[in-house]
Image (tube, rainbow, N blue to C red):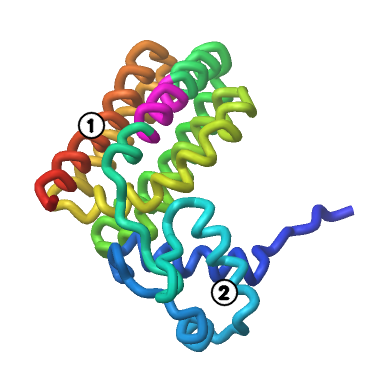
Amino acid sequence: MKAIKVQPSLTEQVYEAIADEICNGNLPSGSHLVQEQLALRLGVSRQPVQQAMALLKADGMVEDTGKRGLSVTPLDRNLMRHHYGVRAALDGLAARMAATRCREASEVAKVFAQRARTILNAGETAVEKRDVAEQVRQDVALHDLVYEVSGNPLLARTAEPHWRFLRRAMGEVLRRENLPGETWRQHAGIVEAIAAGDSARAEALMVEHDLTAATKLYRALEGRE
């Protein structure tokens, strides 16, 4: 019996399409979102757009602006930093546990390194193409892999609400000059430490990676204000 492949629902596809536009900066803060226009652009009915908007609103990407309807939420730099702080703690733990498992089982380390290299290559290609949405997707994929290899299923589940909010922040970070390449160099260092089974270094690099991104974005947003 073959496993059933679950396809994304139409609502999920619409959600991803709009989230990508926000992450890419094509829909900047304050952009007015007209559901009829979005439905027309995406070639769908209003219903999946309405459902996607509800999800985007719950994730903090979209807000209700009264009579004008919905618009892209301004990025709250303080809230962003709080989310990054929690994520750094979870990511650091995941990296440490993943490295420990790699040290204890060479096959785990081998499979992790292979899967991570595929993601790193895809991320670097996205940087070359300046495809911010794809960079965000591959960034999420790499961290998801670390959660998986950690062996603790609660980590990904606990981090999920922070990731939904931070997709937007990551888009802002990755559009900054010189940051995309630096981000993926940091990822490569984290992968190397985990695959080598160096739990202390993997945790330190992961936490530094998360908090550095938060600090740089916080300062950039502060300068705008």
Element on which disc 1 rests: helix
Q: At x 37% / y 44%, what residue is drawn?
A: 120
**In this image, 201 relative to 177: left or right?**
right
Vertical relation: 95 (above or below) 45: above
Q: At x 56% / y 28%, what residue is drawn?
A: 155
Residue at the far left: name it.
223
Residue 9 part of the magenta segment: no
Quadrant of residue 200 within the rendered picture: top left
Give how far across and how far down residue 8 sits, in percent: 65, 63
Q: Which residue is mark 2?
A: 49
**In this image, 137 relative to 223: left or right?**
right
Q: Which residues are magenta?
A: 83-92
Q: At x 62% / y 84%, what residue is drawn?
A: 45
Residue at the far front: name it.
67
**In this image, 21 relative to 115: left or right?**
left
Give how far across and how far down residue 222 sits, in percent: 14, 44
